[in-house]
Image: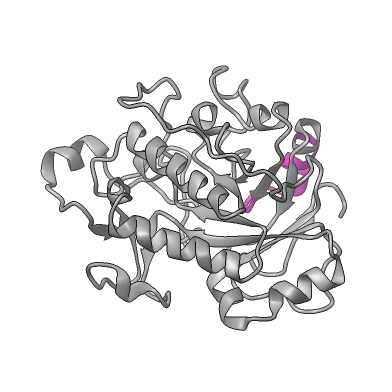
Amino acid sequence: MRLPALISAATLVAALSVPPFALLPAAASAASATVSAAASARVPATTPVATGLPAPVPCDGCWRPALKTSWQWQLSSLPVKPYPNVRMFDIDGFDAAEDGTIVASLKAGRPDRGLLCYISAGTFEDWRPDAARFPEEWEGERWLDIRAYTGTLGEIMKARLDMCKAAGFDAVEPDNVDGYGNDSGFPLKAADQLAYNAWFANEAHKRGLSVALKNDVAQIPRLLPYFDFAVNEECWQYTECTTAQNGGDYGYDQFVKAGKAVFQVEYDLAPSAFCARSNAQNFNSLKKKYELGAYRVPCRGA
């Protein structure tokens, strides 16, 4: 989901003192939020990194999507037959694990189909079955202090990755991995986000799961070696899809240049306003509704 910024990070840093692992309010989901371009956090890719990152963990034999891959992104419900004849599905990991049959059913219809396990890696969601593992109970959805990934938070995320693997998924889509660029309520820095995202990608690879970088556009240059492909919401809406749009510093064309697929969605723009540009960049773009149900309009006709 794409979350709006609410107040300045500088104000939060000055005003807040937070425990090592805590949760603070997240904004409403993309299904209910109206996000302005001004509210969309833009953090320069040149932000200095205080500490080095670990070496990327290789994922030999992992499934990876081709640059041109038809797909469906459906989170509000599980797909039902007849399934769209696409090469990749991105569905909710918890719902799939509870269902127990959807992954096998999707693969039975097309054995070469890749399946992505959607989980939130940056927010607490009180409706998830592992909610009690978090240190406090909150209503709704809250940002996480990702700096605590070496402790309890990391163990929770490892368990979620284990769930994805056990359910038969090929890859994982960790959402909300750009808290440092939003008003999360924590004094998160670019270096904190880089460390957490690199750690998460490595943990996915250790389990034989490929991993998508979700949004976090400004950190693409540093994170490209860790992630196998990208998933983006509304980069055409916010004029941040390409390096040319971002002052030559970062963009999804860097993924394509590296031979890594880009899966992209617009909610408010008409297909005529972005499909030709997406196709020219070799992005796999869809027009979707905010609830991320079965509705889809593919830019490439499949």
| Residue drawn at (67%, 58%) of the image | 170
The reply, left or right, for residue 75 in relation to residue 9 is: right
User: What segment is highlighted magenta in the picture?
Assistant: 266-277
In the rendered image, the vertical position of residue 6 relative to residue 100, given as above or below: above
Residue 209: x %, y % from top left: 61, 53
Residue 21: x %, y % from top left: 23, 55
The reply, left or right, for residue 301 in relation to residue 277 is: right
| Residue drawn at (39%, 74%) of the image | 130
The question of residue 273 being in magenta is answered with yes
The question of residue 133 being in magenta is answered with no
Asked whether residue 71 is in view, the answer is: yes
Residue 177: x %, y % from top left: 44, 47
**Quarter placement of the C terminus:** bottom right
In this view of the protein, which residue sits in the foreground, 269 or 157?
A: 157
Q: How many marks?
A: 0
In the rendered image, the vertical position of residue 301 relative to residue 193, given as above or below: below
Residue 18: x %, y % from top left: 15, 51
| Residue drawn at (75%, 78%) of the image | 80
Asked whether residue 26 is in view, the answer is: no
In the rendered image, the vertical position of residue 240 relative to residue 244, given as above or below: below
